[in-house]
Image (spheres, rainbow, N blue to C red):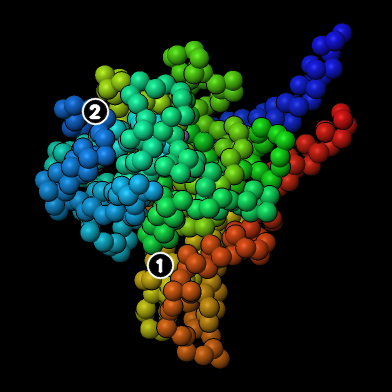
């Protein structure tokens, strides 16, 4: 009898979470069936046949900061026409945050070549992403002349690889650590995946931005990334935004974005291309690393797993053109080197296939119909909902998209907006759609662009300072699932409390 109130309390506590979990599983199942019918999902076997054999690194290993730096510059020296190295800033302890670009157009943005990024080692002791990204760069470059699929990918994409977002934490972490937090944080003991501006700043105030966080934010504003993945360790699954939810006192809530269908496809594309991530668990061979919640298909909405305010993928979604997911790439956080070949084999085709998702996008230029000049800062939206993309300095845009029929609306200051119907289907998966806008006759001559007018500043300022941001407004109108989930949870709490 003494246990009844406790059990009842636990039941009431987890009930909303379980309901939310069931809802998300049902949504994911329906979407995955739909994508499979459309031929959108490739199995690992199909990808192996399509991509073909790739060159494998002779030795997979862990690289400390100085070895990693030498290796990056070695690749750059060996492949000067396919690589470009730059630093996006420094860590707290002064280590460079090196990025290697792999592309036929490595040095700078080339028109109609989309930008992609991988970010590894944000948590310093989650070392596998960092090592696998080194292997990935090696394979892309050494397979370029022998593998046509990889050559096409490198010719048509700018692939930016930030091997380590937290080099200070990595130096503190130790090989053989399976689940500790030693080295997880940066040198100021801050968790970088809780340090980005929060979606609900009053509810979840962000702490002081860390140098590593600011470096990634500036980088993400300067390069118009289309797609991104953030590689972590601790289990094997993909999670997708939103990571947060405006409530305290619950461990998890289903919190989909208005682009949920797109995120489910992106997440499942990675999981299905992995040797086993897409299967129901156990997710980890080692029992004590297995999760209580085992996602049915290896993918899960971030907040439905557990709520994370100030995460990087939410910030990417709200403040940049980029869609980002988070990949928990392996269970053991810092495994011994001998295990790396196995982990590389589990992930290598998924890592390649995910980069290729960048090309499932409607894209083109927004152009002044009289002058033929590209229009910067024009907004591009789909069915007047979800994420709004902003054109770059040349009027170029890339907007990831699923198959279907959409209304593409383009708007720019001093121009007549245009809405165009587009049909995205399996034989036209990456439609090139240029949009011509007519200048309104009564408008003054536009001022020269200033830093304050840059598209990223505009979106960031509006997304995080008021409820009138384009993204927030769209969410208000379209996040029916979120609102329903919230109301149901309140109702249940009221009934049982
Ligand atoms: Zn992590």
The residue tagged 2 is: 61
Q: On screen, 304 above or below 343? A: below
Question: Alpha carbon of mark 2 to alpha carbon of mark 1: how far?
Answer: 39 Å
Q: Is residue 182 visible?
A: yes
Seen at 59% across and 23% down, the residue is 293
Seen at 39% across and 37% down, the residue is 169
The residue tagged 1 is: 392
Q: Any atom of ligand 1 within 8 Å of the CB at mark 2? A: no
Q: Give how far across and how far down residue 395 sits, in percent.
A: 40, 70
Front-lying residue, 416 or 325: 325
Q: Tell me the quarter of the image containing the N terminus.
A: top right
Q: Can residue 360 be seen in this view?
A: no
- The reply, left or right, for residue 397 in relation to residue 406 is left
Other-residue count near label 1 (Cα within 10 Å), few / some / many at <14 / 14–19 / ≥20: many
- The reply, left or right, for residue 437 in relation to residue 430 is right
Q: Which mark is residue 127?
A: none
Front-lying residue, 81 or 34: 81
Q: Give how far across and how far down residue 147 sits, in percent.
A: 18, 38
Seen at 30% across and 33% down, the residue is 132
Q: What element carries label 2?
A: loop
Dividing the picture into quarters, in which one does residue 369 lie? bottom left
- The reply, left or right, for residue 96 in relation to residue 269 is left
């Amino acid at each position: 009898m003494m246990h009844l109130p406790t059990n009842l309390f636990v039941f009431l506590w987890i009930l909303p979470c379980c309901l939310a979990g069931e809802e998300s599983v049902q949504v994911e199942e329906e979407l995955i069936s739909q994508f499979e019918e459309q031929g959108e999902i490739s199995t690992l076997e199909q990808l192996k046949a399509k991509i073909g054999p790739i060159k494998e690194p002779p030795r997979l290993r862990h690289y400390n900061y100085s070895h990693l730096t030498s290796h990056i510059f070695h690749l750059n020296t060996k492949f000067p026409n396919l690589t470009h190295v730059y630093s996006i800033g420094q860590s707290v302890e002064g280590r460079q945050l090196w990025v290697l670009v792999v592309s036929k157009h490595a040095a700078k943005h080339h028109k109609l070549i989309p930008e992609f990024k991988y970010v590894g080692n944000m948590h310093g002791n989650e070392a596998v992403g960092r090592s696998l990204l080194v292997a990935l760069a090696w394979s892309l470059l050494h397979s370029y002349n022998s593998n046509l699929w990889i050559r096409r990918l490198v010719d048509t994409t700018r692939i930016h690889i930030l091997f380590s977002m937290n080099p200070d934490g990595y130096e503190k972490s130790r090989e053989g650590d399976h689940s500790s937090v030693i080295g997880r944080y940066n040198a100021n003991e801050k968790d970088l995946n809780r340090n980005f501006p929060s979606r609900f700043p009053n509810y979840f105030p962000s702490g002081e931005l860390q140098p590593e966080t600011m470096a990634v934010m500036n980088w993400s504003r300067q390069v118009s990334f289309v797609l991104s993945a953030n590689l972590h360790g601790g289990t094997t699954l993909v999670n997708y935004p939103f990571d947060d939810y405006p409530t305290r006192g619950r461990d998890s809530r289903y919190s989909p974005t208005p682009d949920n269908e797109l995120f489910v496809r992106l997440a499942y594309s990675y999981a299905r291309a992995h040797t086993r991530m897409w299967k129901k668990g156990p997710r980890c061979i080692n029992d004590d690393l297995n999760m209580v919640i085992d996602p049915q298909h290896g993918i899960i909405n971030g907040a439905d797993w557990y709520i994370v305010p100030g995460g990087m993928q939410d910030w990417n979604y709200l403040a940049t053109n980029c869609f980002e997911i988070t990949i928990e790439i392996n269970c053991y956080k810092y495994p011994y080197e001998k295990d790396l070949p196995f982990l590389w084999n589990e992930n290598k085709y998924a890592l390649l296939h995910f980069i290729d998702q960048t090309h499932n996008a409607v894209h083109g230029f927004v152009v002044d119909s009289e002058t033929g000049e590209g229009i910067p800062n024009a907004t591009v939206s789909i069915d007047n909902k979800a994420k709004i993309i902003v054109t770059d300095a040349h009027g170029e845009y890339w907007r990831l998209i699923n198959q279907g029929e959409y209304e593409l609306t383009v708007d720019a200051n001093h121009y007549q907006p245009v809405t165009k119907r587009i049909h995205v289907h399996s034989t036209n998966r990456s439609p090139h759609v240029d949009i011509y806008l007519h200048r309104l006759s009564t408008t003054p001559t536009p001022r020269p662009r200033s830093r304050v007018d840059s598209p990223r500043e505009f979106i960031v300022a509006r997304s995080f300072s008021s409820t009138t941001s384009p993204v927030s407004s769209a969410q208000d109108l379209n996040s029916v699932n979120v609102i329903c989930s919230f109301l149901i949870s309140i109702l249940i709490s009221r009934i049982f409390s």
